[in-house]
């Protein structure tokens, strides 16, 4: 179980790999983002994305599951206040296999919430060609193993 | 049909309302974010979120659909390069009804892509009590009605 104190700036944690199917791309788009390039192969090919491509919000949601399966489920996470930035760098196409990592940027105990610390991550999601398709930073709240402001990470 | 030139800084466009059901909260979480507070009423009540609560990525995905139905489907959108920031301010609980708006911050033609302009939005999602549950900024690429750098928005 990973507590606040276990996260080291510069250290990377793996995201679990994820194969992206056409069925999943279309199902997500039909519910949340019904733009033609996310629903139809021909419309995707005609767009700047070059094929049936996942909604950026689908990629973000798949990243969440990849992070959960990769390491978050084995941590003392108390959730996140938000996203500092997220960039969609390349299309995610049906048939791609995604992987990646979360790298610790910094961490600090929260004065406002004793027993909780904030760990900031750079997340990078890549396709099977090693191209970064999405990257972003976000802070995640982690419980401390030992209480008190003396706790440090790394 | 809304083109780049039609977006005015300071002008707000409505997000379509969305009722959040427990079934949707659990289905999204089971696929993308299987943390207990998103899967189970009792676990949600025991967490800081206070009830069965939507994953932040579910709220973001619902926002995308609210934006599509509210105004994006009637625009010349060419997609978005990412999210500048996104804050999850309050829990989104099963039974909530969400609404909100996208407000134009600024807009400029892209020198690198003739015929396309970038419109930056502040998006705000509220619950039925008028509380902001999520807010964030993101740029969306819009086709110009008239080509050329002389085009201005507003």
Image (cartoon, coloured by chain):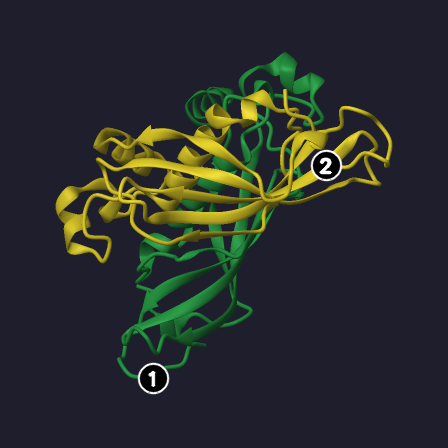
Chain colours: A yellow, B green
Q: Residue at x 33, y 34 (%)?
A: A28
> Considering depth in this image, is A2 or B92 the residue closer to the camera?
A2
Residue B86, x across and y down, in percent: 57, 49
Query: Subunit of mark 1?
Result: B
Compute the Cα span from label 1 to label 2: 50 Å
Out of A39 and A52, give the one closest to the viewer.
A52
Q: Which residue lies furthest to the left in this view?
A: A42
Q: In which quarter of the image is the N terminus of chain B?
A: bottom left
Look at the image and tell me in which quarter the C terminus of chain B lies: bottom left
A69 or B21: nearer the viewer: A69
Q: Badge 1: how crowded within 10 Å, few (<14), some, or many (20+)?
A: some
State left or right for residue A68 relative to residue A134: right
Q: Same chain for marks 1 and 2?
A: no
Residue A62's x, y, as percent?
A: 40, 33
Look at the image and tell me whether residue A135 can be seen.
yes
Q: Residues within 10 Å of mark 2 (few under 14, many from 20)?
A: some
Residue B44 at x, y = what percent? 64, 19
Identify the residue under disc 1.
B149
- Determine which quarter of the picture holds residue B126: top right
**Location of mark 2 (residue):** A153
User: Helix or strand or loop: what does disc 1 sit on?
Assistant: loop
Looking at the image, which is closer to me, A59 or A145? A145
- Residue B17 seen in the current view: no
Residue lying at 34% horizontally and 36% vertically, measured from the top left: A98
Image height of A132 relative to A113, above or below: below
Chain letter of mark 2 equals: A
Q: Do the residues labelled 1 and 2 touch (CB within 8 Å)?
A: no
Residue B93, above or below B36: below
Snapshot quadrant of residue B37: top right
**x 60%, y 33%: residue:** B92
Residue A100 percent location from the top left of the image:
42, 38
Element class at badge 2: loop
């Amino acid at each position: 179980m990973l507590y606040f104190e276990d996260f080291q700036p510069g250290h990377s944690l793996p995201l679990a790999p994820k194969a992206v199917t056409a069925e999943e791309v279309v199902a997500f788009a039909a519910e949340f983002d019904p733009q033609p390039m996310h629903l139809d192969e021909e419309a995707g090919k005609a767009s700047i994305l070059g094929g049936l491509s996942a909604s950026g919000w689908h990629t973000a949601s798949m990243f969440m599951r990849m992070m959960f399966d990769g390491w978050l489920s084995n941590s003392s996470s108390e959730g996140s206040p938000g996203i500092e930035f997220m960039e969609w760098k390349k299309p995610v196409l049906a048939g791609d296999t995604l992987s990646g990592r979360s790298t610790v940027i910094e961490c600090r105990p929260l004065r406002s919430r004793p027993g909780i610390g904030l760990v900031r991550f750079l997340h990078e999601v890549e396709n099977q060609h090693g191209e970064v398709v999405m990257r972003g930073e976000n802070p995640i709240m982690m419980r401390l193993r030992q209480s008190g402001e003396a706790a440090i990470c790394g």
